[in-house]
Amino acid sequence: MPPVSAGCLVTREGPDGLEVLLVHARRASFRKPLFGIPKGLVEEGEDIEATARRETREETGLEVRLRGSLGSIKQKSGKIVHAFWATVAPESEAAIDKQGRCSHPDEENDVCRFYTLDKAEELMIPAQRELLRRLPTKARW
């Protein structure tokens, strides 16, 4: 059975329109599009929504509000990723600087910041790009 993980495609309204939060694993190359959503493995007895919130908080330092399911995708590695559309909780907005960077990311990632939809699509792991297309119209303000 392939590994199962869950995470959040976190959106916010930025100065140039809708932005999404991406992370870049510290050990990954910058030569390929290897940015993705904050996510992680589902722990025993944990539901996927709880995993998505926990992993997003652990990797970014941000509390989020889940807005809806974006379904699941299968990455090239075979890992199944359950994704949720989320927004930044009001109590975490101050933890994002003027450039859209998280002020308290974990040690696993060397980049944690918001990008415009066009830039995000360019940077994201190919399988995760599908999540951008699944964002509800209402997410696009």
Image: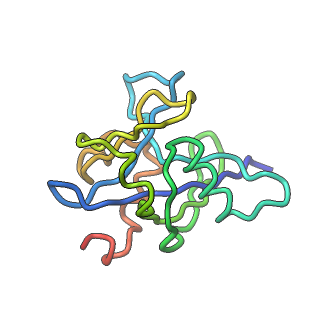
Left or right of residue 77: residue 34:
left
Residue displayed at 37% across by 74% down? 136
Residue 87 picture location, percent across and down: 42, 64
| Towards the viewer: 112 or 42 | 112
In this figure, what is the number of numbered marks? 0
Q: Nearer the viewer, residue 8 or 102?
A: 102
The quadrant in which the C terminus is found is bottom left
Q: Position of residue 103 (x, y in %)?
A: 41, 37
Front-lying residue, 79 or 111: 111
Q: Position of residue 47 (x, y in %)?
A: 74, 65
The answer to whether residue 75 is above or below residue 33 is below
Residue farthest right in this picture: 45
Q: Is residue 15 left or right of residue 106?
A: left
Instruction: State the residue at coordinates (39%, 28%).
Output: 32
- Identify the residue at image location x=36%, y=41%: 113
Q: How is the image coloured?
A: rainbow
Is 49 placed above or below 129 here? below
Farthest residue toward the left? 16
Tell me where residue 88 sits by quadrant: bottom left
Q: Is residue 91 left or right of residue 3?
A: left
Which residue ends up furthest to the bottom in the rendered image? 138
The x, y position of residue 128, in whole percent, is: 46, 51
- In depth, the one of 23 and 79 nearer the eye is 23
| Residue under the point 35% across and 53% down | 20
> Residue 9 lies in what quarter of the image?
bottom left
